[in-house]
Image: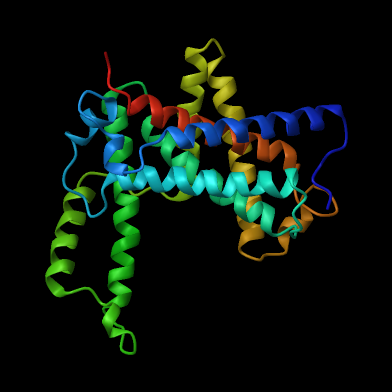
C-alpha cells in the first residue's frame, strides 16, 4: 500500500508520527480511570463544571470519550504501520477521520485560554451530544420489534428537559463548522507561542477541511475521493494528513491533563 513515503521529508514526518504515538500513550496513562476525576476542585475543568446546567450527558464523559476515540483510532493506525499489520486502504482514512473528529472536539472545548470561551464551546459540545441522543430517543420510541430498548417515559421526559435547558441560546454546529472553529483555537494557541495567528490558523483550517472532506468521502463509500490528487492507494498525502491528526490528538491529551490539574 502506498501511503506517501516518497522522500526524506516523508520519512521524517513518519518518525515524528511514531514519536507522537509514544507520547499519546504516556499521556493516556496519566488520565484518571474515572472520568469524574477529570474535573477536581481547583482545576480549570472543575471551575467549568460549576458553570454548566445539568446536561443529558456529563461533559466529563464527553471529553473522556473523545480522548478514548482519538487515541484508539490514531494508535491503531500507528500499529498498522509500525508492526506491519495487514489492512486495506479504506481502513486508514476511516480511522484517521474518526481520530480527527474526536480529538478536535476536545481541543475545541479545552483549548481557549479564556474561561468564558471554554464555557461557550462546552455548551456547543453538549448540544451536539444531546442532539444525537434525542434523535436516538425519537427513533426508539417508534420501535415495535425492539420495544425493550425504549427508555421508560420518566427517563425520556427528564432527559428531554435537560436537553432543552442545554440547547437554550446555543448554536448547533455541524462537524465541518466545529472543525473550522477548532482550527482557529489552534491558531490562537500557536500565536501565543510566537507564530502568526492568521496565517497559521488559515493553514490549519484548510488542511483540516481537506482531510475531513476527503476522508469522509472514503468513510461513506463514495468514489469521488479517487478523483483528487493522491497515491494509487489513497487520496491526498496520507503521511501529511496523519501528521496533522497526530498533532491534534497530542494537543487534546495535553490540554486535558493541564485543564484537570489543580492549580497551586
Q: Is residue 212 visible?
A: no
- Residue 103 coordinates in the image, percent (x, y): 49, 41
- Residue 11 coordinates in the image, percent (x, y): 81, 31
The residue at the point 70 percent across, 60 percent down is 90
Looking at the image, which residue sits at the far right? 7
The residue at the point 28 percent across, 70 percent down is 137
Q: Is residue 86 above or below residue 248?
A: below
> Quadrant where the C terminus lies?
top left
The residue at the point 49 percent across, 49 percent down is 69
Q: Is residue 52 above or below residue 113?
A: below
Quarter of the rendering containing residue 133: bottom left
- Nearest the viewer among 142 and 59 is 59
Q: Is residue 48 visible?
A: yes
- Residue 67 coordinates in the image, percent (x, y): 45, 42
Quarter of the rendering containing residue 148: bottom left
Q: Is residue 60 above or below residue 87?
A: above
- Nearest the viewer among 260 and 171 is 260
Amino acid at each position: 500500500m502506498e501511503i506517501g513515503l516518497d522522500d526524506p521529508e516523508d520519512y521524517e514526518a513518519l518518525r515524528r508520527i511514531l514519536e507522537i504515538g509514544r507520547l499519546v500513550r504516556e499521556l493516556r496513562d496519566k488520565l484518571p480511570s474515572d472520568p469524574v476525576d477529570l474535573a477536581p476542585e481547583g482545576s480549570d475543568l472543575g471551575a467549568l463544571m460549576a458553570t454548566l446546567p445539568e446536561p443529558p450527558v456529563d461533559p466529563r464523559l464527553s471529553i473522556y470519550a473523545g480522548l478514548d476515540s482519538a487515541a484508539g483510532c490514531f494508535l491503531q493506525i500507528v500499529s498498522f504501520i509500525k508492526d506491519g499489520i495487514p489492512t486495506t486502504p479504506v481502513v486508514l482514512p476511516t480511522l484517521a477521520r474518526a481520530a480527527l473528529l474526536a480529538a478536535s472536539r476536545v481541543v475545541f472545548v479545552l483549548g481557549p485560554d479564556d474561561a468564558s470561551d471554554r464555557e461557550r464551546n462546552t455548551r456547543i459540545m453538549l448540544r451536539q451530544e444531546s442532539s444525537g441522543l434525542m434523535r436516538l430517543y425519537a427513533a426508539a420510541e417508534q420501535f415495535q420489534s425492539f420495544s425493550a430498548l425504549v427508555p421508560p417515559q420518566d427517563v425520556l421526559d427528564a432527559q428531554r428537559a435537560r436537553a432543552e435547558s442545554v440547547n437554550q441560546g446555543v448554536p448547533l454546529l455541524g462537524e465541518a463548522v466545529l472543525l473550522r472553529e477548532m482550527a482557529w483555537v489552534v491558531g490562537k494557541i500557536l500565536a501565543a507561542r510566537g507564530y502568526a495567528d492568521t496565517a497559521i490558523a488559515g493553514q490549519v483550517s484548510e488542511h483540516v477541511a481537506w482531510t475531513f472532506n476527503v476522508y469522509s468521502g472514503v468513510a461513506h463509500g463514495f468514489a469521488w475521493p479517487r478523483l483528487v490528487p493522491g497515491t494509487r492507494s489513497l487520496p491526498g498525502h496520507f503521511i501529511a494528513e496523519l501528521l496533522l491528526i497526530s498533532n491534534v490528538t497530542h494537543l487534546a491529551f495535553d490540554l486535558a491533563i493541564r485543564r484537570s490539574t489543580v492549580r497551586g
